[in-house]
Image (cartoon, rainbow, N blue to C red):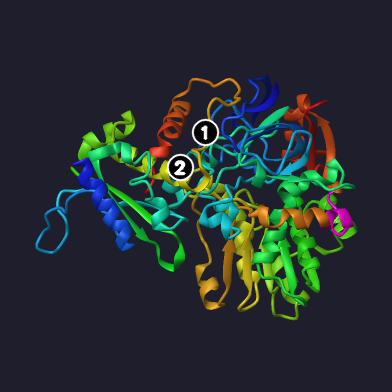
């Protein structure tokens, strides 16, 4: 089959590889019909995640059709149209039973990496380095889906491929940020990042009752989507000073909930951006936490900050004093999508959540290296690129 | 020895608390057992009697007299803390590094066995990764390090 392969920093190729096989009884093989770029892939592409290996297949946000099931699969059958959560869940460990499914104890065959880096490992994830298990990704014609009964979700009638594919990751990740960030009716919520995840976090906050939602970015086409499709307010950080603006917009209080949806390659304007841009290449810090710092400084006293963006290592000039003295709650997670996806598919079906606008570009898998180049550079108003492995 | 071990296992299950798979080790004046490895543990979301129903679970049992094993109730109803430690202590010094790289460090066998025992009990099988589709793997020094890390990862970590 064909697959998009990581060959080195900023180097991708489409290659012929072996087809996947059923290896465990709970596996399924899925024929991929849509698979999309995700901002977190750019951390892999740029060499920020050190356990990538040349030859690894990228892709973790996808949907398709089941073409083969192992003997232990009960919920699904060949022919089912399914969307996969990007993280895998065994369904039987304590974490999965608590709904903390990206922390699954049994789905990551390479726990040593995560334990060495963070003290504990995450669960397994498709196409996201050896640290999350070394599983082949979804930018391919076929993909093996471990724990298929838990990881794959049947797509209801009336939900198109273009809508469903984002329920794999962007929608549940955004929803989790608003939900576990503690958004309540009447809240004011600020979201850093107007990519797919940020937009979905903003929409989730609105559906959870937030009275005012403000999304911060600098890319006009993304800010326009936020205003026209999501229905939230926007701030352009290239034009405005964010902290004073947010204070002014919130009567001097600051947002009740701040959701960071940017990740380790954040940038901004001002001296802190220059500081981070110098220190990261020198490996004096591994990640650039610019948006996280701002979210912490912006949050109201006693408010909460949720870190949705992906971080891998250590950061500098982290405002711990602000967290302590303002009494903030800081939470974070890789997505626990399994607890949300059935509900979110129904919301998409009812039209409460729109996702199809996110795939600004669609192309065959053969053109995926070009697609990632566009996505990385935000060329031509690119928000996400959807690949069709079937052509 | 094997019969004695199973008898102790059975007695432990009957007591509902601790199972020790070998005779009690000599202790220092402070009460710390001497010359043995650190207890390494996984928490399994099943009760002790289910975890130890057939004795020490595989593949821990296959490590035989290399280890001793205990299973205790986890607090808060969180199942069973299944622990194992090396009877003859753990490698130290430069030799330890070499054995870790070569995959002969006995701690790796203990960690792997604990993780696999947990998977077998909780989900019925050990998750496999290979063979998997992959593109061209370049032979580079950094790639060799990642490959080595991936190969040893199941037996490494902080467990």
What residue is disc 2 on?
Answer: A113
Between label 2 and label 1, give the one nearer the viewer.
1
CB atoms at circles 2 and 1 under 8 Å apart? no
Closer to the camera in the image, A308 or A122: A122
- The chain to which mark 1 is attached is B
- The chain to which mark 2 is attached is A
Q: What stretch is highlighted in magenta?
A: A347-355
Asked whether A388 falls inside the magenta stretch, the response is: no
What residue is disc 1 on?
Answer: B128
Closer to the camera in the image, A357 or B45: B45
Answer left or right for B153 relative to A38. Answer: left
Secondary element under disc 2, as helix, strand or loop, is helix
Circle 2: is it few (<14), some (14-19), or many (20+) Cα within 10 Å? many
- Determine the residue positioned at 77% across, 58% down: A343
Answer left or right for A69 relative to A108. Answer: right
- Whole-percent x, y for residue A290 in the image: 61, 57
- Determine the residue positioned at 63% across, 55% down: A336
Q: Which mark is residue A330?
A: none
A285 in relation to A129, above or below: below
- Determine the residue positioned at 84% across, 35% down: A362
- Whole-percent x, y for residue A338 in the image: 67, 53
B62 in relation to A260, above or below: above
Answer left or right for A316 relative to A36. Answer: left
Instruction: Say whether residue A190 is visible.
Output: yes
Instruction: Say whether residue A268 is visible.
Output: no
- Whole-percent x, y for residue B10 in the image: 29, 53
- Determine the residue positioned at 58% across, 73% down: A328
């Amino acid at each position: 089959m064909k697959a998009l392969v990581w060959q080195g920093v900023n180097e991708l190729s489409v290659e012929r590889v072996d087809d996947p096989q059923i290896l465990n009884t709970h596996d399924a093989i899925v024929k991929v019909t849509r698979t999309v770029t995700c901002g977190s892939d750019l951390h892999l592409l740029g060499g920020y995640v050190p356990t990538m290996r040349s030859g690894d297949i990228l892709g973790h946000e996808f949907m398709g059709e089941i073409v083969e099931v192992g003997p232990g699969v009960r919920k699904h059958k060949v022919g089912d149209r399914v969307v996969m959560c990007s993280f895998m869940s065994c369904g039987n460990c304590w974490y999965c039973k608590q709904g903390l499914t990206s922390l699954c104890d049994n789905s990551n065959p390479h726990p040593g990496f995560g334990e060495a880096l963070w003290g504990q490992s995450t669960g397994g994830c498709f196409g996201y380095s050896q640290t999350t298990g070394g599983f082949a990704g979804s930018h391919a014609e076929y993909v093996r889906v471990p724990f298929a009964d838990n990881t794959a979700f049947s797509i209801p009638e009336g939900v198109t491929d273009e809508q469903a594919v984002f329920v794999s990751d962007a929608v549940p990740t955004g929803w989790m940020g608003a939900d576990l960030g503690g958004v309540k009716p009447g809240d004011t919520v600020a979201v850093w990042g107007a990519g797919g995840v940020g937009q979905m976090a903003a929409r989730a906050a609105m559906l959870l009752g937030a009275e005012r939602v403000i999304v911060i970015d600098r890319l006009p086409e993304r800010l326009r989507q936020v205003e026209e499709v999501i229905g939230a307010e926007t701030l352009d950080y290239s034009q405005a000073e964010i902290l004073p603006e947010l204070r002014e917009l919130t009567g001097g209080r600051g947002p009740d909930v701040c959701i960071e949806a940017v990740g380790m390659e954040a940038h901004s304007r001002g001296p802190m951006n220059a500081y981070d841009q110098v220190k990261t290449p020198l490996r004096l810090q591994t990640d650039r936490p610019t948006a996280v710092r701002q979210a912490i400084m912006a949050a109201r006293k006693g408010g909460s900050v949720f870190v949705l963006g992906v971080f891998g290592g250590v950061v500098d000039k982290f405002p711990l004093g602000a967290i302590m003295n303002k009494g903030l709650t800081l939470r974070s997670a890789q997505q626990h999508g399994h607890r949300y996806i059935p509900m979110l598919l129904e919301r998409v079906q009812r039209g409460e959540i729109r996702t199809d606008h996110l795939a600004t570009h669609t192309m065959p898998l053969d053109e995926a290296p070009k697609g990632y180049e566009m996505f990385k550079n935000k060329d031509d108003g690119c928000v996400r690129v959807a690949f069709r492995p079937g052509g | 020895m094997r019969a004695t071990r199973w008898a102790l296992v059975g007695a432990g299950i009957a007591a509902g608390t601790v199972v020790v798979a070998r005779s009690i080790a000599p202790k220092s004046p402070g009460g710390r057992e001497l010359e043995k490895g650190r207890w390494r543990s996984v928490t399994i979301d099943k009760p002790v009697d289910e975890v130890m129903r057939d004795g020490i679970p595989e593949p821990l049992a296959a490590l035989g007299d290399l280890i001793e094993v205990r299973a205790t109730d986890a607090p808060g109803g969180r199942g069973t803390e299944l622990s194992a430690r090396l009877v003859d202590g753990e490698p130290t010094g430069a030799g330890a590094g070499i054995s870790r790289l070569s995959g002969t460090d006995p701690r790796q066998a203990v960690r792997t066995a604990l993780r696999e025992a947990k998977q077998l009990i909780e989900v019925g099988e050990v998750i496999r990764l290979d063979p998997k589709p992959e593109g061209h793997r370049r032979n580079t020094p950094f790639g060799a390090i990642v490959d080595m890390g991936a190969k040893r990862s199941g037996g490494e970590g902080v467990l």
